[in-house]
Image: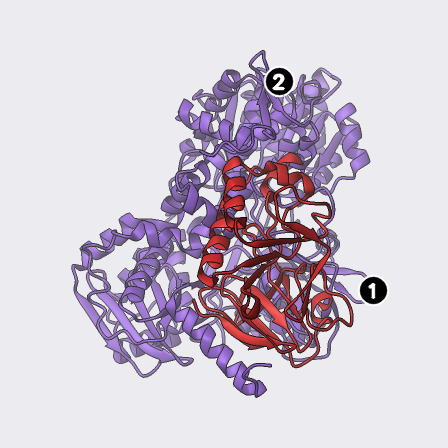
Amino acid sequence: MTALPTAFSDWFAARGWQVHPHQREMLDRAGEAALMLIAPTGGGKTLAGFLPTLAELVAAPSEGLHTLYISPLKALASDIRRNLLVPISEMGLPIRVEDRTGDTSATAKKRQRVDPPHILLTTPESLALLTSYEDAPRMFAGLSRVIIDEIHALAESKRGDQLMLALSRLEAMAPGLRRVGLSATVEDPPALAALMARGGAPCPVLLADPGPDPDIATLRTEAPPPWSGGGGRYAIAEILEEVKRHRTTLIFHNTRAQAEIFFHHLWLANSDDLPIGIHHGSLSREQRDAVEKAMTEGQLRAVVCTGSLDLGIDWGNVDLVIQVGAPKNVKRLIQRIGRANHRYNAPSKALLVPANRFEVVECVAALEAARSHHLDGDPRGTGPLDVLCQHLLIRACAGPFDEMELFCEVRSVGAYAGLSRAAFDDCLAFCATGGYALKAYDRWQRLVQRPDGLWQLRDPRAAQRIRMNIGTIQDTDTLKVRLRGAGKPLGEVEESFAATLSAGDTFLIGGQIVRYEGLKEMTVEVSRSASKKPRVAVFQGTKFATSTQLADRILEMFRQGSWPALPDHTAAWLSLQRELSQLPARDRVLVESFPHDGLAHTCVYGFAGRNAQQTLGLLLTRRMETSGLNPLGFVSTDYATLIWGLDRVEDPAPLLRAEGLREGLDDWLKGNAVMKRTFRGAATIAGLIERNLPQARKSGRQATFSSDILYDTLRKYEPDHLLMRITETEALRGLVDFGRIEEFLARTEGRIDHIKLERVSPLAAPMLLEVGKVPIAGEGRERLLAREAEALMAEAGLDGL
Amino acid sequence: MTAHAFTLCSTPLRALPSGALHILGEAALCVSDLHLGKSDRIARLGGGLLPPYEARETLTRLEADILATRARQVICLGDSFDDLAAQSSLGQDERLWLARLQAGRRWVWIEGNHDPGPVELGGSHLAELALGGLIFRHIAVEGAAGEVSGHYHPKHRIRGTARPAFLYDKSRLILPAYGTYTGGLSSGEPALSALFKKPAMAVLTGTKAIPVPF
């Protein structure tokens, strides 16, 4: 048991604070090899993680790195540093705390490797980079504790897998290292703990008192939400009133684009000039820093934000969280609500603002689930091999390695415990030679085996290239946006969006309207514009999928004769749907067909969850392509798939026939954009494609080519290549979910209701504005291109030169 | 195969959907920017080990075009190799394949910025070539007339779909890159669009050649 030093108890007492029971217990059990604390936001979770470190460093001052703290966000690392420095300086403790992220200067980084602080705060990517240096063993030799904050957020993605692999490296360099995980409320704490523990060792879970239930309600508005669309503009007046009534309000949006539009309109309505800021991942660092600083200093009354502010940053004065748009996931809602009233034992306060009428239904279902403490989550798969490939390359950067030793080390990581030697060898072969049947790189292997059996980089200079591409966060290619002349970066837009701009177009970024001037050295140059009607820049933004638990609750609600729990407008909307078409039911398939925008649209309500609906879209469009219906594309939500094409669907029954559905699925899947997108991610993480090259990108793009070409080449010449297998596994798990389609077809047994309509139905309307449309490259697209080309030719009065 | 037929300075030409140019009167086929050996060069420099099937894929398409057009002459319009060392990286199979394609045909390697030196693989190596009233060179020259060039890897976009494309006006034609591992430069980039005077055309490649005003 570690005693709480007097200096600490005095400091706590001087502030009128008490040590929480879970903080006390963390101190008592500081010796555990692995320990996970689950505490609600505001429960002093982070301090609980650090108390043993501070106590140990006071009791036995030491040199070198004692504790490594890892958080998913850069901002969180610097925030924690500020928070830790307060008690350390007030108690006069001889403890050095520094952070190290992508934003840390090169000089500071170099110094940290030579003379590390007692406590280093960093991110999974910066840690992976640190382990790639040859001097890593010296830096980490004395490491005693690792604290992983917000581990629930990391565990949901490949960043978590990369982090756990890096931990296995740390363990090798500092045996006996203690691991501490800090997590918000999750549905399955032991599963999360198992991921973190070393080689199947136990990892006890400490549960802090969850505190009082949050106070969540739906915001009442004068105007009803629109039928479709996102953004919550209709509620701006009421939201401004709430902002005035509270000290500081966080206004969460599900996507960056929505946050931008909302912020723009909020400003137009902000007649009292309340200080309100915007914060999302596409804004420049300078802008985000400024907002974070103003926020910490209590200068802002509200911040319009996205998931970039989702995690436990200490927002001091925040007393209200507003969620615009359905929360999509009950767990995330609860974690977000933790932002408000960041004091233990005061209920947090949150308001939901559904953006359209379907979301009213979702919000009501989410509130019910939250009140009954029903959290949702998806089971995790095994450790992804693309992340392992990157890990092998990172390991090679640090110096020669023995394959057997590394194999055992990797197997000590929870997610990779079941990794076969064959799979490991495939990854090693991929890193060394590319792993192709055609042996083309004998001379230029990336890794070579020395006579003593150890593996090393063929060319040590390759280490720089590998280091520049560390990380598993997939971002689409983005271009910086700058004001012409001023040279001040405003943020970033996706390259595909920039490609559609022509001089004079206006768009929204960082809450201001700008005019596109041109592209200069891969930077979008803009000027300020007085235009009133901007287009909205396309951001990748995170798009959450509604959990299947919510989908089931909604289907249950549809069975009611009336909806007293829903606001009148939404109940009326559902009644209208029932009147014009019908409401989807568990045991039937509802199919609606209607013309829109000159194309035939068909909407299939499967309520099978987003991934399965996506696959259903692929399968249906394949059948439509073969029956000559010329599908052009589709979009899926958790509830339905909307397909558009040149020809009308007259009879959906053959399209939805269960038999033979799976046949040809593979072929169709493999030619599809969804697979290509998945491949791009895997190929980038595994080190086949380099996002960053040593020399800066030249203007023009002749030098780079699309990953689709690599995918097509492999598909033709080596369809069983490791990367193709990784792509397939990932797509089957994440995107295909074929089992749920079969379950949907089984529960409905061909009972199809095909409703033909003159125009879009009330329920289908929101689908038209969904993002994430999947194009179908078939005969229909060729015909459409030819038609468009002819029109352009006719318009120009040309039939040749 | 649906090609786009047009004339440049009175010379009848066909833009093939594959990105190759057919010069009918000369029984000649012209392809630009093959970039053979690109994957080898990337590997040599310590980058990723790309699928080593690009030369095969490029030669497969080239052979199909040669046979379909019954070309007696083949003009490779520069940047045929990703760099000079990339030539030696060609496998024995690919060398024999090239030799087979060259047999009985006039084969011209135009010099490109990636492959400025002579080529060891048969055929003649020229800075530029005059043929059928046209001049063939790698990089477009200001003020030229009847010029066919490559270098820029042009792409053109309609309805959100961007594809490698031929670009031409009354006096010049720029070919899309023919090599498998090549990217593209948007036709709207000033470096490229400044070379053309209206009216100009773009011909998208793909399953059919699709002409549009540019």
Closer to the camera, A433 or A770?
A433
Picture coordinates of residue B116, whole percent (x, y): 73, 48
* Relative to A603, residue B29 above or below: above
Q: Which chain is purple?
A: A
- The disc at residue A173 is 2
Furthest residue in direction top, as rendered: A452
- The disc at residue A486 is 1
Q: Residue at x 25, y 68 (%)?
A: A590
- The picture quadrant where one finds residue A267 is bottom right
Applied colour scheme: by chain
Q: Residue at x 62, y 46 (%)?
A: A691
Picture coordinates of residue A126, whole percent (x, y): 66, 35
Residue type highlighted by circle 2: Met
Q: Count how many numbered circles sit on residues in the image.
A: 2
- The picture quadrant where one finds residue A74 is top right
Horizontal side of A653 relative to B132 (left or right) equals left
- Sequence-first tag of 2 and 1: 2
- The disc at residue A38 is none
Q: Which chain is red?
A: B
Closer to the camera, A121 or A169?
A169
* Mark pair 2, 1: CA separation: 48 Å
